[in-house]
Amino acid sequence: MDYPGRYWHMLDDGRIQCDLCPRDCRLHEGQRGACFVRQRAGDRMVLTTYGRSSGFCIDPIEKKPLNHFYPGSSVFSFGTAGCNLACKFCQNWDISKSREMDTLMDQASPETIARTAARLGCKSVAFTYNDPVIFAEYAMDAADACHEQGLAAVAVTAGYIHDQPRREFYAKMDAANVDLKGFTDDFYFRLCGARLQPVLDTLVYLKHETEVWFEITTLLIPGKNDSEQEIEAECRWIARELGTDVPLHFTAFHPDYKMMDTPPTPPATLTRAREIARAHGLQYVYTGNVLHDREGGTTFCHGCGEALIVRHWHEILAYEVTSGGHCGTAIPGRYAAFSGPFGRRRIPVRVHAQTA
Ligand code: SF4
């Protein structure tokens, strides 16, 4: 379905410029942007993936990862195709690099998605697998439909978006996990085809101008972004610009896509990164994509050091968060009555219009 896209203007030379993300694609008739899913059709832009998904799954919210947003709840997850970054290490490249629209199996309106998620008992709907910035109109409409059903809307994103659409997009979101893929512009430019500053702008915007709950993820890649100096610089910036209570997840790289020759991240690298972050005052630092690191998955009370939420591989093993906070120290995030964890299951779901 070709849906009228927003965020563009006509240039004097007759091309159309997309104003959604900092790639600023300038398109002649029929051309697609770098994300592949936004296309010029005549004198307008269209979003070619509105209402089409690469598939639906029910996941634990911890898998997004979000550790302070209704822990233990289930989230109805979906993505489309394409991406506005070009990460050589992409861990979802079959979706994000897809130029074949036949990967988009399921068709679903925003209302169908929200009603299906509610019927299946999910607390929220996540726009994930590929970056929702490029299907912003679809994600925002789905977020509206979720709110009508009493569900939350979650964006899993690289945060690479221009200022005006950023405001409109996050006005619809309740939570986000934002990838901070590295902490040098050189890393962003050479390995992601992007720039660092717009991502930092998104994080500062979320912290200081919205009520969106957000957490940050950094995938550590051996020899690329895992030096102590770079991790220290990132943690120093987070503490100074965002505060020490923003959760930070360090996750492990696995060889994929165009970086099959790079080894997986040693668990010791993640543990060391977590130590650095905590030494810089960050209060909620997690490690992910590694087995046997229960401490790195656990939420500790910043006041007394008590283990409040013990996790292992997306599964909650113990939950001690109380509404008044532990030892008087409130734990930042969004919480509801805990009725037991969803567990580490991942349940594929087929969505059809008639299932709503
Ligand atoms: S959203 Fe897509 S078309 Fe628009 S500037 Fe970014 S990559 Fe280009």
Image (cartoon, grey):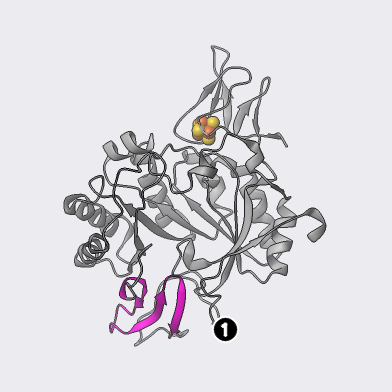
Q: From this viewpoint, is residue 297 visible?
A: yes
Residue at the far front: name it. 261
What residue appears at the point 42 percent right and 42 percent down from the top-left corner?
257
Is 240 situated above or below 75?
A: above
Closest to the observer, 126 or 147? 126
Q: What is the number of callouts on the image?
A: 1
What residue appears at the point 74 percent right and 55 percent down from the top-left corner?
111
Quadrant containing the C terminus in the rendered view: bottom right
Q: Amino acid at mark 1?
A: Ser
Residue 306 is covered by the magenta coloring = yes
**Magenta range:** 295-319
Estimate how packed mark 1 is, as few (under 14), some (14 to 19) or many (20 or more) residues with alpha carbons within 10 Å: few
Residue picked out by circle 1:
339
What residue appears at the point 61 percent right and 69 percent down from the top-left corner?
123
Closest to the observer, 256 or 284? 256
Is 230 situated above or below 61?
A: above
